[in-house]
Amino acid sequence: MTHANDRKYWDPQLETQSRADWNALKLGLLKTHLKHAYDNSPYYRSSFDAAGVKPEDLKTLADLQRFPTIDKKILRERQEAKPLLGDLAAVPEREVVYVSASSGSTGVPTVSPFTQQDFDDWIAYEARQFWSSGLRPEDRYAHSLNFSLFIGGPCVLGAQKLGALSIHAGTVPSERLLAILRQFQATAIWTTPSYAWYLGETAQKEGIDPKKDLAVKRIFVAGEPGGSIPETRARIEALWGAEVYDYYGLSDIFGSCAGMCEEKDGLHWAEDHILVEVLDPETGEPVAPGERGEMVLTTLKKRARPLIRFRTGDIVSFTDEPCACGRTSQRLLGVHGRRDDMLIVRGVNIFPSDVEAIVRKDHDFSGEYRLVIERIDHLDRLTIEVERAAAFPGTADALADRLAHRVKAITGVGAHIAVLDPDTLPRATHKAKRVEDRRGQVWTA
């Protein structure tokens, strides 16, 4: 497919179709996909039978709620039960041409297999997503993500499919990446929000002004909630003099599954590839549009290993309202945290992203922060560690009082504030660790 550079949409008919057409498309794909899973995956056949459901029971999209869910624990167990691909796989290994793997940071790395068609479908979607974010064939795109089994690595092929000059930079040291950006005068990069911030700070320390000495005009970020937090995005944009677009992906399906268009009003979802449900984590019931809930995903085309009602653990919100760009796909309004990152402090739920929005908005702070939760005398205490900005002229006590008041007013949580000197907190070169939970070291019930 060739595209004129001034064309607004990669696939106009698909991207601007009505919600009724989107739902009809998903229903047709889902019926075929459930049958493929049941007929070819030993796990899904036994799982559906145990739940008393069959593919032909699906008459409407709402009927999917009758089918059982799976989670990361099940993926690991089934992979270990039948290595390498596990018995969720629905094609023989000879049809698999590519595998990615999760980091294994929370358990055994899980493998995500692709047939050739799966892989081609994925890369075609990446091209569509890059196009919606304004990337064009005349761009020079530096892909600054890990290539070692990481699902984000091959996304660079979407930029190549689009026609951009693509630089496979990978996760090289910051000084080397800055040298690459200068040599090639790259106009776009992709990394995590934390690393975009860190790289900009590193450039300044080396006497490089990202806004004047580099040519980067678009920064795609993923892997952390920060890209959808306006205050964080604004700070990175001011540092680089570039536009920041948030992307979302997960290793268990494919690279980026959603991304911001140039309106930056939520992330357009890969709705022709993945059906999304947003459910109350406790009851399993759907929440209203715009409300927070756990994201549960079902693949619609991926033949190598279908995922039916996969509980991601991500706490998100979605909207079906059309975007000002004219695209009509569902939009992810933000990943507000993870079920396992959510802190409950004296009965109140709080996510790191809630604090980040407050800290990044106030320029008397450096923008770095960490949440430390401890149990003292059987009571939980939240400490928010922040750094003062180097140019802040006031006292640490005044800064702490101001932040404590804002956190209490916005989240309902009373927190102790520790104001640190600049460059005290560790900088992340990949995903930042924002929560340190010390309660298990103090007392357990």
Image (tube, rainbow, N blue to C red):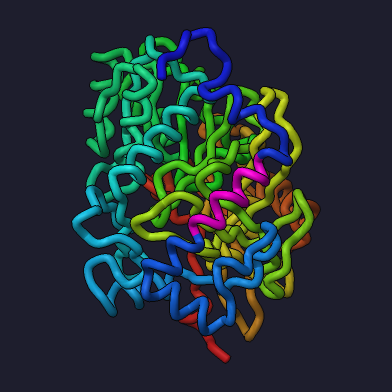
Which residue is found at the position 44% from the left and 52% from the top? Answer: 250
Quadrant hosting residue 372: bottom right
Residue 355 part of the magenta segment:
no
Can you see residue 372? no
Nearest the viewer among 168 and 254 is 254
Q: Residue 100, how many percent across, how many down?
A: 29, 52
Can you see residue 167? yes
Q: Residue furthest bottom?
A: 445
Q: Residue 322, how many percent across, how many down?
A: 73, 32
Please indicate whether residue 39 sits to the left or right of residue 95 in the image: right
Q: Main secondary structure of the magenta part?
A: helix
Question: Is residue 241 placed above or below 89 in the rendered structure?
Answer: above
Please indicate whether residue 310 sits to the left or right of residue 141 in the image: right
Q: Residue furthest front?
A: 56
Question: Is residue 134 placed above or below 226 in the rendered structure?
Answer: above
Q: Quadrant of the N terminus?
A: top left
Count of numbered tags: 0
In the image, the segment drawn in magenta is: 22-33
Please indicate whether residue 314 sits to the left or right of residue 217 in the image: right
Which residue is found at the position 50% from the left and 24% from the top? Answer: 239
Residue 23 part of the magenta segment:
yes
